Image: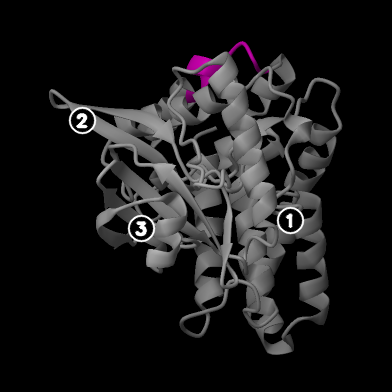
Amino acid sequence: MQEIFSLYGWKVNSYAPIHQGLINSTYSIQTNTGNYILQSINHNVFKSPTAIDENINAISSYLQKNNPSYLFTHLVPTLNGDTLVNWEGGYYRAFHKVEGYALSVLDNENQVEQAAMQFAGFTSVLKNFEASQLKDTLSDFHNLNLRYHQFSEAIVKGNAQRITETKAAISFLVAHKKYVDIYAAFIHHTDVKKRVTHHDTKISNVLFQKNNGIEKAICVIDLDTVMAGYFISDIGDMCRTCLCKVSEEEKDLNKVVVDAAKWKALEKGYLYFMQDELSSFERDHFFYGGQFMIYMQALRFLTDHLNNDIYYGAKYEGQNLVRTLNQIRLLEQYNKLN
Protein backbone atom coordinates (compact mmCIF):
# COMPACT_ATOMS: atom_id res chain seq x y z
CA MET A 1 0.00 0.00 0.00
CA GLN A 2 2.84 2.38 0.84
CA GLU A 3 4.28 1.84 -2.63
CA ILE A 4 0.98 2.89 -4.19
CA PHE A 5 0.57 5.84 -1.80
CA SER A 6 3.97 7.13 -2.86
CA LEU A 7 2.90 7.18 -6.53
CA TYR A 8 0.29 9.78 -5.59
CA GLY A 9 2.63 11.67 -3.29
CA TRP A 10 0.33 11.03 -0.33
CA LYS A 11 1.45 11.30 3.27
CA VAL A 12 -1.16 8.96 4.70
CA ASN A 13 -2.46 9.45 8.22
CA SER A 14 -4.71 6.38 8.15
CA TYR A 15 -6.57 4.08 5.78
CA ALA A 16 -9.28 1.43 6.12
CA PRO A 17 -11.13 -0.98 3.82
CA ILE A 18 -14.71 -0.28 2.76
CA HIS A 19 -16.68 -3.52 2.59
CA GLN A 20 -19.86 -2.44 0.77
CA GLY A 21 -18.86 -3.33 -2.80
CA LEU A 22 -18.81 -6.90 -4.11
CA ILE A 23 -16.45 -6.65 -7.09
CA ASN A 24 -13.58 -4.26 -6.39
CA SER A 25 -11.48 -3.81 -3.24
CA THR A 26 -11.98 -0.30 -1.89
CA TYR A 27 -10.14 1.75 0.74
CA SER A 28 -10.80 5.06 2.44
CA ILE A 29 -7.55 7.06 2.65
CA GLN A 30 -6.91 10.01 4.98
CA THR A 31 -3.91 12.17 4.04
CA ASN A 32 -2.46 15.51 5.07
CA THR A 33 -3.86 17.06 1.87
CA GLY A 34 -7.34 15.53 1.82
CA ASN A 35 -9.33 12.31 1.79
CA TYR A 36 -9.41 9.85 -1.07
CA ILE A 37 -10.96 6.59 -2.20
CA LEU A 38 -8.48 4.02 -3.55
CA GLN A 39 -9.77 1.02 -5.48
CA SER A 40 -8.23 -2.04 -7.01
CA ILE A 41 -10.16 -3.15 -10.09
CA ASN A 42 -11.20 -6.80 -10.20
CA HIS A 43 -9.33 -7.94 -13.29
CA ASN A 44 -11.17 -11.29 -13.33
CA VAL A 45 -14.47 -9.48 -13.94
CA PHE A 46 -13.24 -6.48 -15.94
CA LYS A 47 -10.79 -7.79 -18.51
CA SER A 48 -9.85 -4.31 -19.75
CA PRO A 49 -9.30 -1.86 -16.88
CA THR A 50 -7.88 0.61 -19.41
CA ALA A 51 -11.29 0.78 -21.11
CA ILE A 52 -12.89 1.75 -17.78
CA ASP A 53 -10.18 4.35 -17.20
CA GLU A 54 -10.62 5.84 -20.67
CA ASN A 55 -14.42 5.97 -20.33
CA ILE A 56 -14.33 7.74 -16.98
CA ASN A 57 -11.72 10.22 -18.19
CA ALA A 58 -13.69 10.98 -21.36
CA ILE A 59 -16.82 11.73 -19.34
CA SER A 60 -14.80 13.65 -16.77
CA SER A 61 -13.25 15.88 -19.43
CA TYR A 62 -16.64 16.55 -20.99
CA LEU A 63 -18.21 17.50 -17.66
CA GLN A 64 -15.32 19.73 -16.61
CA LYS A 65 -15.73 21.63 -19.86
CA ASN A 66 -19.52 21.68 -20.18
CA ASN A 67 -20.93 21.28 -16.67
CA PRO A 68 -18.19 21.82 -14.06
CA SER A 69 -20.69 22.21 -11.20
CA TYR A 70 -22.04 18.66 -11.69
CA LEU A 71 -20.87 16.45 -8.81
CA PHE A 72 -18.82 13.69 -10.38
CA THR A 73 -16.18 11.32 -9.01
CA HIS A 74 -13.25 12.53 -11.12
CA LEU A 75 -10.15 10.35 -11.11
CA VAL A 76 -7.07 11.59 -9.24
CA PRO A 77 -3.80 11.42 -11.24
CA THR A 78 -0.53 10.12 -9.83
CA LEU A 79 2.54 12.34 -9.74
CA ASN A 80 3.25 11.09 -13.25
CA GLY A 81 -0.24 12.05 -14.44
CA ASP A 82 -1.60 8.49 -14.67
CA THR A 83 -5.17 7.77 -13.56
CA LEU A 84 -4.70 4.00 -13.76
CA VAL A 85 -1.85 2.30 -11.91
CA ASN A 86 -0.65 -1.17 -12.86
CA TRP A 87 1.30 -2.47 -9.86
CA GLU A 88 2.36 -6.08 -9.25
CA GLY A 89 -0.33 -7.40 -11.59
CA GLY A 90 -3.11 -5.32 -10.05
CA TYR A 91 -4.88 -2.21 -11.33
CA TYR A 92 -5.58 0.73 -9.04
CA ARG A 93 -7.26 4.12 -9.31
CA ALA A 94 -8.14 6.91 -6.89
CA PHE A 95 -10.96 9.41 -6.47
CA HIS A 96 -11.45 12.41 -4.25
CA LYS A 97 -13.69 11.22 -1.44
CA VAL A 98 -17.20 12.65 -1.62
CA GLU A 99 -18.70 12.99 1.83
CA GLY A 100 -21.87 10.95 1.93
CA TYR A 101 -23.19 7.47 2.54
CA ALA A 102 -24.57 4.64 0.45
CA LEU A 103 -27.65 2.59 1.32
CA SER A 104 -28.02 -1.16 1.04
CA VAL A 105 -31.64 -1.25 2.18
CA LEU A 106 -34.45 1.13 1.20
CA ASP A 107 -36.68 2.46 3.94
CA ASN A 108 -39.03 4.68 1.96
CA GLU A 109 -40.11 5.85 -1.50
CA ASN A 110 -38.27 9.18 -1.13
CA GLN A 111 -34.99 7.25 -1.32
CA VAL A 112 -36.18 5.52 -4.52
CA GLU A 113 -37.22 8.82 -6.10
CA GLN A 114 -33.94 10.48 -5.14
CA ALA A 115 -31.88 7.59 -6.51
CA ALA A 116 -33.86 7.51 -9.76
CA MET A 117 -33.34 11.27 -10.16
CA GLN A 118 -29.59 10.83 -9.82
CA PHE A 119 -29.34 8.02 -12.37
CA ALA A 120 -31.59 9.93 -14.78
CA GLY A 121 -29.66 13.13 -14.13
CA PHE A 122 -26.41 11.35 -14.97
CA THR A 123 -27.74 10.29 -18.39
CA SER A 124 -29.40 13.67 -18.94
CA VAL A 125 -26.33 15.79 -18.18
CA LEU A 126 -24.45 13.73 -20.78
CA LYS A 127 -27.17 13.91 -23.46
CA ASN A 128 -24.86 15.77 -25.85
CA PHE A 129 -21.88 13.52 -25.13
CA GLU A 130 -21.26 11.08 -27.98
CA ALA A 131 -22.03 7.78 -26.26
CA SER A 132 -20.59 5.72 -29.11
CA GLN A 133 -17.07 6.78 -28.12
CA LEU A 134 -17.38 4.81 -24.87
CA LYS A 135 -15.78 1.38 -24.87
CA ASP A 136 -17.69 -1.74 -23.77
CA THR A 137 -16.27 -2.73 -20.40
CA LEU A 138 -18.47 -5.84 -20.24
CA SER A 139 -19.37 -7.08 -23.70
CA ASP A 140 -23.06 -8.00 -24.25
CA PHE A 141 -23.75 -7.24 -20.58
CA HIS A 142 -27.50 -6.67 -21.06
CA ASN A 143 -28.00 -8.44 -24.39
CA LEU A 144 -31.24 -10.36 -23.82
CA ASN A 145 -30.95 -12.16 -27.15
CA LEU A 146 -27.63 -13.64 -26.04
CA ARG A 147 -28.91 -14.53 -22.56
CA TYR A 148 -31.87 -16.42 -24.02
CA HIS A 149 -29.56 -18.24 -26.43
CA GLN A 150 -27.33 -19.30 -23.52
CA PHE A 151 -30.42 -20.45 -21.62
CA SER A 152 -31.63 -22.44 -24.65
CA GLU A 153 -28.30 -24.25 -24.83
CA ALA A 154 -28.29 -24.97 -21.10
CA ILE A 155 -31.73 -26.64 -21.11
CA VAL A 156 -30.37 -29.07 -23.73
CA LYS A 157 -26.70 -29.53 -22.81
CA GLY A 158 -26.75 -28.75 -19.09
CA ASN A 159 -26.86 -30.98 -16.00
CA ALA A 160 -29.51 -33.59 -16.89
CA GLN A 161 -30.70 -34.08 -13.32
CA ARG A 162 -31.03 -30.34 -12.74
CA ILE A 163 -32.91 -29.95 -16.03
CA THR A 164 -35.42 -32.55 -14.85
CA GLU A 165 -35.76 -30.97 -11.42
CA THR A 166 -36.38 -27.47 -12.80
CA LYS A 167 -38.97 -28.21 -15.47
CA ALA A 168 -41.50 -25.79 -13.96
CA ALA A 169 -39.03 -22.89 -13.94
CA ILE A 170 -37.85 -23.76 -17.45
CA SER A 171 -41.44 -23.85 -18.70
CA PHE A 172 -42.17 -20.45 -17.15
CA LEU A 173 -39.17 -18.80 -18.79
CA VAL A 174 -39.88 -20.39 -22.18
CA ALA A 175 -43.53 -19.30 -21.92
CA HIS A 176 -42.40 -15.70 -21.38
CA LYS A 177 -40.07 -15.53 -24.38
CA LYS A 178 -42.19 -12.60 -25.55
CA TYR A 179 -39.85 -10.37 -23.53
CA VAL A 180 -37.01 -11.41 -25.84
CA ASP A 181 -39.11 -10.66 -28.90
CA ILE A 182 -40.02 -7.22 -27.50
CA TYR A 183 -36.34 -6.53 -26.83
CA ALA A 184 -35.34 -7.51 -30.37
CA ALA A 185 -37.92 -5.14 -31.82
CA PHE A 186 -37.11 -2.38 -29.32
CA ILE A 187 -33.37 -2.12 -30.03
CA HIS A 188 -33.95 -1.87 -33.78
CA HIS A 189 -36.70 0.76 -33.61
CA THR A 190 -35.84 4.11 -35.19
CA ASP A 191 -37.13 6.01 -32.14
CA VAL A 192 -34.84 4.20 -29.71
CA LYS A 193 -31.54 5.86 -28.85
CA LYS A 194 -28.33 4.62 -27.28
CA ARG A 195 -27.25 6.94 -24.47
CA VAL A 196 -24.65 7.07 -21.71
CA THR A 197 -26.06 4.38 -19.42
CA HIS A 198 -24.89 3.39 -15.93
CA HIS A 199 -25.92 -0.28 -16.24
CA ASP A 200 -25.67 -1.01 -12.49
CA THR A 201 -28.36 1.12 -10.89
CA LYS A 202 -28.75 -0.62 -7.56
CA ILE A 203 -29.39 1.63 -4.58
CA SER A 204 -25.87 1.26 -3.18
CA ASN A 205 -24.47 3.05 -6.24
CA VAL A 206 -25.89 6.41 -5.17
CA LEU A 207 -24.41 8.58 -2.43
CA PHE A 208 -26.78 10.31 0.00
CA GLN A 209 -26.39 13.19 2.44
CA LYS A 210 -28.70 14.34 5.20
CA ASN A 211 -29.10 18.06 5.90
CA ASN A 212 -31.48 19.36 8.57
CA GLY A 213 -33.08 15.95 8.72
CA ILE A 214 -33.77 15.86 4.96
CA GLU A 215 -32.17 12.97 3.07
CA LYS A 216 -31.04 13.72 -0.47
CA ALA A 217 -29.14 11.79 -3.11
CA ILE A 218 -26.12 13.76 -4.33
CA CYS A 219 -24.28 11.70 -6.97
CA VAL A 220 -23.88 8.33 -8.65
CA ILE A 221 -20.83 6.17 -8.03
CA ASP A 222 -19.31 2.91 -9.35
CA LEU A 223 -18.85 3.85 -13.00
CA ASP A 224 -17.14 0.67 -14.21
CA THR A 225 -20.18 -0.45 -16.24
CA VAL A 226 -20.90 2.96 -17.81
CA MET A 227 -21.28 2.28 -21.53
CA ALA A 228 -23.52 3.22 -24.42
CA GLY A 229 -26.82 1.49 -23.80
CA TYR A 230 -30.59 1.64 -23.59
CA PHE A 231 -32.53 3.38 -20.86
CA ILE A 232 -34.39 0.14 -20.05
CA SER A 233 -31.15 -1.20 -18.54
CA ASP A 234 -31.11 1.50 -15.87
CA ILE A 235 -34.87 1.38 -15.28
CA GLY A 236 -34.75 -2.41 -15.10
CA ASP A 237 -31.99 -2.71 -12.54
CA MET A 238 -33.69 -0.12 -10.32
CA CYS A 239 -36.94 -2.08 -10.55
CA ARG A 240 -35.14 -5.31 -9.74
CA THR A 241 -33.34 -3.97 -6.68
CA CYS A 242 -35.41 -1.08 -5.33
CA LEU A 243 -39.04 -2.23 -5.37
CA CYS A 244 -38.80 -5.20 -3.01
CA LYS A 245 -37.60 -5.21 0.59
CA VAL A 246 -35.77 -8.51 0.23
CA SER A 247 -32.91 -9.41 -2.10
CA GLU A 248 -32.53 -12.06 -4.78
CA GLU A 249 -31.14 -14.39 -2.08
CA GLU A 250 -34.47 -14.62 -0.20
CA LYS A 251 -35.77 -18.20 -0.06
CA ASP A 252 -39.18 -17.37 1.41
CA LEU A 253 -41.04 -16.32 -1.73
CA ASN A 254 -43.92 -14.93 0.30
CA LYS A 255 -41.58 -12.09 1.25
CA VAL A 256 -40.99 -11.19 -2.39
CA VAL A 257 -43.53 -8.40 -2.76
CA VAL A 258 -43.34 -5.29 -4.96
CA ASP A 259 -44.11 -1.92 -3.37
CA ALA A 260 -46.42 0.06 -5.69
CA ALA A 261 -45.54 3.37 -3.99
CA LYS A 262 -41.85 2.78 -4.67
CA TRP A 263 -42.63 2.04 -8.31
CA LYS A 264 -44.43 5.37 -8.66
CA ALA A 265 -41.52 7.11 -6.92
CA LEU A 266 -39.06 5.48 -9.32
CA GLU A 267 -41.07 6.59 -12.34
CA LYS A 268 -41.46 10.13 -11.00
CA GLY A 269 -37.77 10.44 -10.13
CA TYR A 270 -36.48 9.14 -13.46
CA LEU A 271 -38.85 11.17 -15.60
CA TYR A 272 -37.96 14.34 -13.69
CA PHE A 273 -34.89 14.60 -15.91
CA MET A 274 -35.69 12.19 -18.75
CA GLN A 275 -39.33 12.92 -19.62
CA ASP A 276 -38.43 15.09 -22.61
CA GLU A 277 -35.37 13.05 -23.56
CA LEU A 278 -37.29 9.84 -24.21
CA SER A 279 -39.28 9.34 -27.40
CA SER A 280 -42.96 8.43 -27.06
CA PHE A 281 -42.04 4.89 -28.18
CA GLU A 282 -39.43 4.67 -25.43
CA ARG A 283 -41.86 6.02 -22.82
CA ASP A 284 -44.32 3.33 -23.90
CA HIS A 285 -41.64 0.79 -22.90
CA PHE A 286 -40.93 2.28 -19.48
CA PHE A 287 -42.73 -0.50 -17.61
CA TYR A 288 -41.12 -3.07 -19.89
CA GLY A 289 -37.74 -2.02 -18.46
CA GLY A 290 -38.55 -3.89 -15.25
CA GLN A 291 -39.83 -6.95 -17.11
CA PHE A 292 -36.73 -6.97 -19.30
CA MET A 293 -34.24 -6.95 -16.45
CA ILE A 294 -36.01 -9.23 -13.97
CA TYR A 295 -36.67 -11.80 -16.70
CA MET A 296 -33.07 -11.62 -17.92
CA GLN A 297 -31.72 -12.13 -14.42
CA ALA A 298 -33.97 -15.17 -13.94
CA LEU A 299 -32.61 -16.56 -17.22
CA ARG A 300 -29.03 -15.98 -16.13
CA PHE A 301 -29.47 -17.58 -12.71
CA LEU A 302 -31.18 -20.68 -14.12
CA THR A 303 -28.64 -20.96 -16.93
CA ASP A 304 -25.86 -20.97 -14.36
CA HIS A 305 -27.68 -23.52 -12.20
CA LEU A 306 -28.05 -25.86 -15.18
CA ASN A 307 -24.39 -25.33 -16.08
CA ASN A 308 -23.26 -26.35 -12.58
CA ASP A 309 -22.75 -22.80 -11.24
CA ILE A 310 -19.76 -21.95 -13.40
CA TYR A 311 -20.48 -18.20 -13.61
CA TYR A 312 -21.97 -16.93 -10.35
CA GLY A 313 -20.81 -19.85 -8.27
CA ALA A 314 -22.85 -21.17 -5.34
CA LYS A 315 -22.20 -21.06 -1.62
CA TYR A 316 -24.64 -23.92 -1.13
CA GLU A 317 -26.33 -26.54 -3.32
CA GLY A 318 -29.10 -24.96 -5.39
CA GLN A 319 -28.33 -21.32 -4.61
CA ASN A 320 -28.79 -20.24 -8.22
CA LEU A 321 -32.12 -22.08 -8.36
CA VAL A 322 -33.21 -20.15 -5.26
CA ARG A 323 -32.23 -16.95 -7.04
CA THR A 324 -34.12 -18.06 -10.15
CA LEU A 325 -37.36 -18.78 -8.29
CA ASN A 326 -36.96 -15.50 -6.42
CA GLN A 327 -36.74 -13.55 -9.68
CA ILE A 328 -39.66 -15.44 -11.24
CA ARG A 329 -41.76 -14.52 -8.23
CA LEU A 330 -40.53 -10.92 -8.46
CA LEU A 331 -41.56 -10.78 -12.11
CA GLU A 332 -45.02 -12.12 -11.29
CA GLN A 333 -45.44 -9.54 -8.54
CA TYR A 334 -44.11 -6.74 -10.72
CA ASN A 335 -46.58 -7.56 -13.49
CA LYS A 336 -49.45 -7.02 -11.04
CA LEU A 337 -48.60 -3.30 -11.09
CA ASN A 338 -49.53 -3.01 -14.74
Q: Is residue 260 above or below residue 161?
A: above
* Residue 131 on image: x %, y %: 73, 30
Whichever of callouts 2 and 1 sits on the residue coming sooner in the sequence is 1
Residue 250 visible in image: no
Quarter occupied by the C terminus: top right
Residue at 76% of width from left, 25% of height from top? 193
Q: Which residue is mark 2?
A: 210
| Residue contact at pointers 3 and 2, CB within 8 angstroms | no
As measured in the structure, the alpha-carbon distance from the residue carrying label 2 to the one carrying label 1 is: 46 Å
Foreground tag (1 vs 3):
3
For badge 1, the amino acid type reads Ala
User: Quadrant of residue 275 in the image?
Assistant: top right
Q: Is residue 19 above or below residue 134?
A: below
Q: Which mark is residue 175?
A: 1
* Residue 25 on image: x %, y %: 44, 63
Residue at 77% of width from left, 74% of height from top? 155
As measured in the structure, the alpha-carbon distance from the residue carrying label 1 to the one carrying label 3 is: 46 Å
56 to the left or right of 251: right
Q: Magenta residues?
A: 270-278
Q: Residues within 10 Å of mark 1 (few under 14, many from 20)?
A: few
Outermost residue, bottom side: 161
Mark 1 lies on a secondary structure that is helix
Quarter occupied by the N terminus: bottom left
For the residue pair 100 and 57, the one nearer the viewer reads as 57
For the residue pair 186 and 14, the one nearer the viewer reads as 14
